[in-house]
Amino acid sequence: MAVRARPAPLAPAPLRPISLRSRLYGFGSVYAKTLRDSRLAFIVVAGLLGGIMLAVGSAIPAVFPTQAARDEVVHLANSLGALAQGLAGKPVNVGTLGGYVQWKYGPFFVIVASLWSILALSGTLASEARRGSLEFVAALPYARGRIAIEKLAAHLTGMLTNVVILAIAAWLAAAAFGSLPGDAISPAAAIAFALWVGLVALAFGGLAFALAPILGRGAAAGISGALLLVGWVANGYAATVPALGAVADLTPWAWTADHLPLAGRTDWVSLVPVAIAAVVLLAAGVFIFARRDLGVTVAIPGPRLPAVAAGTAGPARRSLRERLPVALAWGIGLGLFGMVMAALSSALADAIAQSPDLAQAFGQLFPSIDITSAGGFLELLVDLLTIVVGFAAVTLVSGWASDETSGRLEILLSTPLSPARWALLAGLGVLAAICVLTAVMAVLIGLGAAGAGSDALTPMAGTVVLGLYAAALAGIGFAVGGLVRTSVAAEIVALIVVATYLIDLLAPPLSLPDAIHQLALTAHLGEPMIGVWDGAGIVACLVLAV
């Protein structure tokens, strides 16, 4: 008699419901994972928007404490030539805290938020499609339109949160630091300003989102970023060069030219076409993505990288090859900004020459700086340059860390390559990319200084200090990646950049103890744009980098 053995039936494993927390932040949905993956960018942008608003709000009453000093600011704003006013914008109520912030820093907030939106929305679908990870997401029982909508919703959540942070920071800065009549910023004005920043950013980001499925991330981000910056410049000089008006009219810069809420002038109607453009472009991006083949893009011819940077001949060369496009983009962007600012020194010199009182006021405020030289003018912007260079280092460290977080490191280490050798050589590739970034920035700043008739070598040499600061931050990122884990290296560096900037900017006007101020590495860099270097700071940067 034969007995046939049968396996005992397996009880089906109980299905665990996905928690609400995982659906909102984590791995419970496409929306939640996108929100989690973008936390670094959110920290960076929140620190920039909210932190700089608070820092500037605290510094203005300290630098211009009296009504007479404010009157000098008004005189300066109205005395600048067409070149300077084209970039600075309309000087409306610049004698108040809000008016000064709107005039001098308003476009900066828009550009920061827009660049974040452009980079995020151009890559959230296109980058995943290019590297093949989107196929796994598309294999789920989700329509492609739903995938795009959930990824877009995650970005909109981050943008809304940053808009709220910016509005609170604007109101709080005036409430905490306003010292003269007219310095107060109402909640309505703060909301109007933050809403303007968010909507303009989404309009440019929406353009990148719509173009990315067709052209790919790089081309979409490049076109949108170029229109952002060209529109800003064209809108500023449209009155001086009427031919630029046709270009400016295509961008939200011209549509919202009279919307200056922090200065007491609000044009709510001008925000309507911006909102409509953002909605239409974002909807077009979802529609196009849902109907195109994944990863199939139209190539736009462009220049190729030099052969020395191509290939995969070793970790150092491969690391440089992968970081080089990012380094060139940062270097060209920062260099063009520095070149324009250096060129503006001649216009400022003309304004000061026509006003002895203005020259005396600047001499009292900045006794060690020749404000009429390109280097002196750039020295006033070093705080801004250091924080942007810092975030350039964050992106390079993030790329270095992606070898491990993306799973490629296992393949690399299957060759006769030790983890220590990979870390060393790949890190050298990042430092080489920082050298390229610094060189490009120095050359462009030198051209701007030469065009203004100023000494070009001093600000070019000062740019080297900014490169050393970026290398120090990269060294910190390498240390965090080795001692903790690479997945948090870029985030830690971003937090250090924001904390350093805020300490350096807030410690003097708030009369904080000198020991706190000395914690900021940027407090030990001297005044490099005018040739004053701090030897201890330079050594500290080199030690951190090595």
Image (cartoon, grey):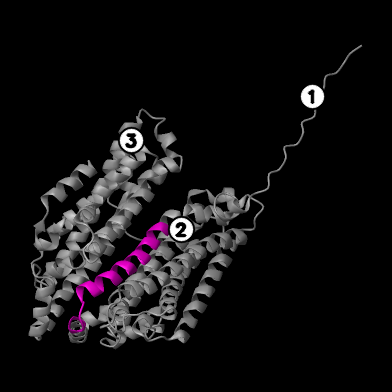
> Is 268 in front, or is 5?
268
Question: Label 2 sits on what residue type?
Answer: Gly
The answer to which image quadrant residue 408 occupies is top left
Number of the front mark, 1 or 2: 1
Residue 292 seen in render? no
> Is 14 in front, or is 285?
14
Packing grade of label 3 (10 A; few <14, some 14-19, many >=20) is some
SS label for mark 1: loop
- Give the number of callouts: 3
CB within 8 Å, label 1 to label 2: no
Secondary structure mostly taken by the magenta-highlighted segment of the chain:
helix
Q: First in sequence: mark 1 or mark 3?
A: 1
Residue at the spot of label 3: 422
Residue at the spot of label 2: 123
Q: First in sequence: mark 2 or mark 3?
A: 2
Question: Label 3 sits on what residue type?
Answer: Trp
Look at the picture and state if 276 lies above or below 240: above
Quadrant where the C terminus sits is top left
Q: CA distance from mark 1 to mark 2?
A: 50 Å
In reply to whether residue 58 is colored magenta, the answer given is yes
> Is 421 in front, or is 61?
61
Number of the front mark, 1 or 3: 1
Stretch in magenta: 42-70
SS label for mark 2: helix
